[in-house]
């Protein structure tokens, strides 16, 4: 049941924070609802989880409309966003987790009616199949965002490779954390970069141990 799953995830968040003496208030659980219907999404929201994430434009818009009576939801968009979909999506979301090109930044700048909180997606593992900015190019990429007044870089986001070991997960998340701190230390007003979006159902404990502030969890909340 969703309520039991949610309790289990929240317990694991607390336990993971305790391992490294962090306060669990530093970690925002984002419920990834991409693979469930609106009814289950509402059930999760009714259990008190107010940060929800989708990765497909059309499904997101349909759900948001059906849930418009729930006014206290923060919507996160975590997927690859096609440029032609930016117009319909960008003013409907609270956070965008997958900024990974200047072309996309240009389109957001053109379509956004307010400042959009964005995570720059980083390809930490160097896997060629992965989305995201190569970490060697991250600084230059972020510096180029200075002129985009509709984009605020609140943090960095990454995914660990599908079949990575725990050791590899630790390395990847630690690397994202150090990149985040490196950008934060620059003190850029368009890129405060205080956050890290990392960790999913299988690896969020490791991500929290390495300093995650937003974790994106789907399967673990909806398993039977
Ligand atoms: C699906 C997805 C998640 C959640 O994955 P689970 O393994 O179901 O927890 C997190 N982040 C992104 C970018 C996703 O696409």
Image (cartoon, grey):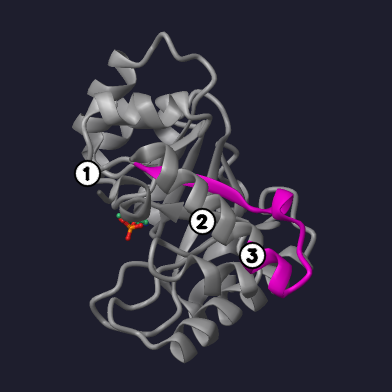
Residue occupying image coordinates x 37% and y 85%: 126
Q: Secondary structure at mark 1?
A: loop
Residue occupying image coordinates x 50% and y 25%: 73
Q: Secondary structure at mark 3?
A: helix
Q: Secondary structure at mark 2?
A: strand
Q: Is mark 3 within 8 Å of ligand 1?
A: no
Q: Earlier in the sequence, mark 3 or mark 2?
A: 3
Q: CA distance from mark 3 to mark 1?
A: 27 Å
- In the rendered image, residue 191, in percent from the top left (x then y), is placed at 67, 53
**Disc 1 packing (10 Å; few <14; some 14–19; many ≥20):** some
Name the residue nearer the viewer: 214 or 111. 214
**Disc 3 packing (10 Å; few <14; some 14–19; many ≥20):** some
Residue 196 in view in this figure? no
- In the rendered image, residue 58, in percent from the top left (x then y), is placed at 19, 30
Q: Is mark 1 within 8 Å of ligand 1?
A: yes
Q: Earlier in the sequence, mark 2 or mark 1?
A: 1
Magenta residues (range): 15-32
Residue occupying image coordinates x 49% and y 23%: 113
Indicate whether residue 17 is drawn in magenta: yes
Name the residue nearer the viewer: 1 or 194. 1
- Mark 3 or 2: in front is 3
Q: CA distance from mark 3 to mark 2?
A: 15 Å
Q: Are marks 3 and 2 in contact (CB under 8 Å)?
A: no
Q: Are marks 2 and 1 in contact (CB under 8 Å)?
A: no
Q: Earlier in the sequence, mark 3 or mark 1?
A: 3
Q: What label does residue 215 carry, if any?
A: 2
Q: CA distance from mark 2 to mark 1?
A: 17 Å
What residue is pinned by disc 3? 15
Q: What label does residue 35 carry, if any?
A: 1
- In the rendered image, residue 79, in percent from the top left (x then y), is placed at 31, 50
Quarter of the image where the N terminus is located: top left
């Amino acid at each position: 049941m969703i309520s039991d799953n949610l309790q289990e995830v929240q317990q694991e968040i607390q336990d993971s924070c305790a391992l490294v003496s962090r306060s669990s208030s530093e970690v925002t659980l984002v419920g990834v609802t991409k693979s469930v219907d609106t009814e289950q999404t509402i059930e999760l929201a009714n259990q008190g989880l107010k940060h929800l994430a989708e990765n497909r434009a059309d499904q997101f818009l349909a759900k948001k409309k059906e849930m418009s009576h729930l006014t206290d939801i923060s919507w996160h968009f975590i997927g690859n966003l096609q440029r032609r979909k930016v117009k319909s999506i960008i003013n409907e979301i609270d956070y965008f987790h997958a900024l990974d090109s200047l072309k996309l930044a240009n389109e957001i700048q053109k379509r956004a009616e307010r400042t959009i909180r964005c995570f720059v997606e980083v390809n930490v593992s160097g896997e060629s199949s992965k989305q995201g900015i190569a970490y060697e190019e991250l600084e230059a990429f972020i510096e180029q965002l200075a002129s985009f007044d509709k984009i605020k870089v609140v943090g960095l986001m990454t995914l660990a490779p599908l079949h990575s070991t725990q050791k590899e997960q630790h390395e990847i998340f630690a690397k994202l954390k150090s990149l985040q701190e490196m950008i934060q230390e620059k003190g850029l007003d368009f890129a405060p970069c205080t956050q890290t979006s990392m960790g999913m159902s299988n690896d969020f404990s490791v991500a929290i141990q390495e300093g995650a502030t937003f974790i994106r969890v789907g399967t673990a909340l909806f398993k039977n």
